[in-house]
Amino acid sequence: MNSLFPSEKISFDLPNADIVYFPNLFDAEKSNLLFEKLLHEIPWQNDTITVFGKSHAQPRMTALFGNEGKPYSYSNIVMQPHRWNPLLMYIKNEIEEICQKNFTTVLLNLYRDGKDSNGWHADNEKELGRNPMIASVSFGAERSFHLKHNTILDAKQKITLEHGSLLLMKGETQHFWKHQIPKTEKTIGPRINLTFRILK
């Protein structure tokens, strides 16, 4: 059931982390519309990544949009941004109302089915600066988001990222925690995730 209060939020009491979840930032009707537009209007690409000397196709599709042609690099991939379009500007403006931040860049991920995934990592690239805020918006199939602390072994959290939701990670989170979207054997449809960032 959709809440009547899109500002409803859940804060997680975790060491060295500041994580807030808004389960239904966008209502179901708007989420369905945005999902379809993102699926068909974004120029999705499938990059090759090299892990331990072996190259293989990244297990998801990606796209990068942002200001002033600033590239973004992770896992030995350098992505060149497309210019902001009206669709992404609309979502960006909605997120910025809540975050009170001006995001410069968005990295989009398309998980085509349960076999697509994103392994353990932190969003700690140097161009994000110290204590970055990452605003992660999800549309489409629900996926399980896993977090684990780098040194406190029993500090873990799982969050089901719902259609139309926003997850905010800020403060020390990226220095002390890693996160992943694991593969799942379940038969599920596609999910689109937009991670808004500020490149320094």
Image (cartoon, grey):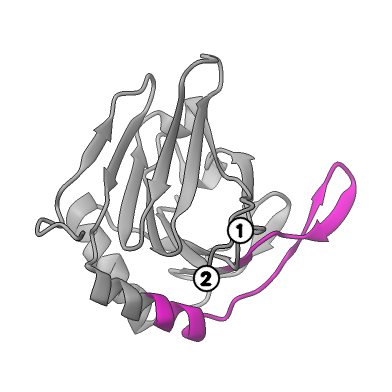
**Where residue 100 appears, x then y in whole percent?**
20, 52
114 shown above or below 34: above
Q: Which region is colored magenta?
A: 35-62
Binning the other alpha carbons within 10 Å of mark 1 as few (below 14), some (14 to 19) or many (20 upward) gives: some
Front-most of residues 136 and 139: 139
Name which residue lies at 52% across and 76% down: 82
Task: Indicate the quadrant containing the N terminus: top left, top right, bottom left or bottom right.
Answer: bottom left
**Where residue 10 appears, x then y in whole percent?**
23, 39
Q: Which mark is residue 114?
A: 1
Name which residue lies at 73% across and 52% down: 76
Give the labeled residue for mark 2.
69
Binning the other alpha carbons within 10 Å of mark 2 as few (below 14), some (14 to 19) or many (20 upward) gives: few
Name which residue lies at 26% across and 53% down: 101
Q: Which mark is residue 9?
A: none
Give the left or right position of residue 99, taking residue 119 as reference. Answer: left
Q: Check disc 1 and give the amino acid type.
A: Gly
Residue reaching furthest to the right: 53
Front-most of residues 79 and 95: 95
Does any portion of residue 103 appear in the rendered image?
A: yes
21 shown above or below 31: above
Q: Secondary structure at mark 2?
A: loop
Q: Check disc 2 and give the amino acid type.
A: Gly
Does any portion of residue 84 appear in the rendered image?
A: no
| Mark closer to the chain start, 1 or 2 | 2
Q: Tell me whether the residue at label 1 lies in contact with that at label 2, contact meaning CB atoms closer than 8 angstroms.
A: no
> Mark 1, mark 2: which one is toward the viewer?
1
